[in-house]
Image (cartoon, rainbow, N blue to C red):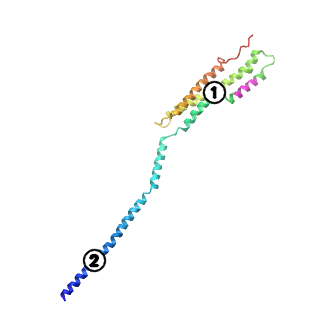
Amino acid sequence: MRGMGTKTVDETEAAEAKHDEEAVDVTKPDEGTEADGEAVQDASDETPDAEDGDEQDEEFQAKQEEGPSGVGQGAGAVVSVALGLVSLTGGWLGTVASAREQLIGQLHTAANAGVAAQVKEVYGDAWQTTALWAGVFALAALVVGVVVLARPAFGAPGKSQAPWIKSVSWAGVALGVIGLFLAVLKYTDVLLGLPSTSS
């Protein structure tokens, strides 16, 4: 009887130990699942969209720190060249002003006026008006070109000017100087002055 009681107790203890081991094995996958779930959640928090947004913000800030793009300076350089060409070739404004001055000279010149007076009033004043407007365009080209060349000194420090902007600006300055010089010569009758009316 005693041996049977001992055997029954041993079997009972072995069965309980086996049951505990099974319970432990059953709970282990749950712990692993929870750990995997936390890892997946942590990975989902760091999404590519957030990283892309941070990169875009950094690029935007970098562009702001770079300063002006130079579009305005390039436009100013082109305008300077255009004004210089107008001063050399003449524009509609100078043509209209010259024709108006010629008409005024015809109206104000008496029919019995001398040849010299008629030439001076009808043609001389008109040519001087053309030279005056050419000088205005040349001066504008010179000023715009110089402003574009001097702009980097007052802009963002360390921001260099594009080579093509410098080249076009210098071209505008050169055309302005040439146009202004020719306009002064024509206005003072040193270049293409009025023909002599003396017999």
State whether residue 120 appears in this view: yes
By secondary structure, the bulk of the magenta-drawn segment is best described as helix
Residue 85 lies, with reference to residue 45, above or below; the image says above
Residue drawn where x is 60% and y is 27% of the image: 139
Give yes or no for residue 101 being in the magenta stretch: yes
Q: Can you give x and y, in whole percent of width and height, for residue 169 in the image?
A: 55, 31
Could you say which disc has been placed on residue 116 in the image? none
* Magenta residue span: 95-104
Residue drawn where x is 24% and y is 80% of the image: 13
State whether residue 136 appears in this view: no
Q: Which residue is mark 2?
A: 18
Residue drawn where x is 69% and y is 30% of the image: 93
Residue at the farthest right position: 111
Q: Can you give x and y, in whole percent of width and height, for residue 123 in the image?
A: 73, 20
Query: With 134 as the anchor, is 109 left or right in this view?
Result: right
Which tag is nearer the camera, tag 2 or tag 1? 2
Query: With 182 as the anchor, is 21 left or right in this view?
Result: left
Kind of residue sitting beneath label 2: Lys
Q: Can you give x and y, in whole percent of width and height, for residue 59 in the image?
A: 47, 47
Residue drawn where x is 44% and y is 53% of the image: 51
Q: Earlier in the sequence, mark 2 or mark 1?
A: 2
Front one among 2 and 129: 2
Real-space Cα separation, disc 2 to disc 1, in angstroms: 107 Å
* Neighbours of disc 1 within 10 Å: few (<14), some (14-19), many (20+): many
Instruction: Look at the image and tell me in which quarter the N terminus lies.
Output: bottom left
Q: Which residue is mark 1?
A: 87
Instruction: Look at the image and tell me in which quarter the C terminus lies.
Output: top right
* Neighbours of disc 2 within 10 Å: few (<14), some (14-19), many (20+): few
Kind of residue sitting beneath label 1: Ser
Element under label 1? helix
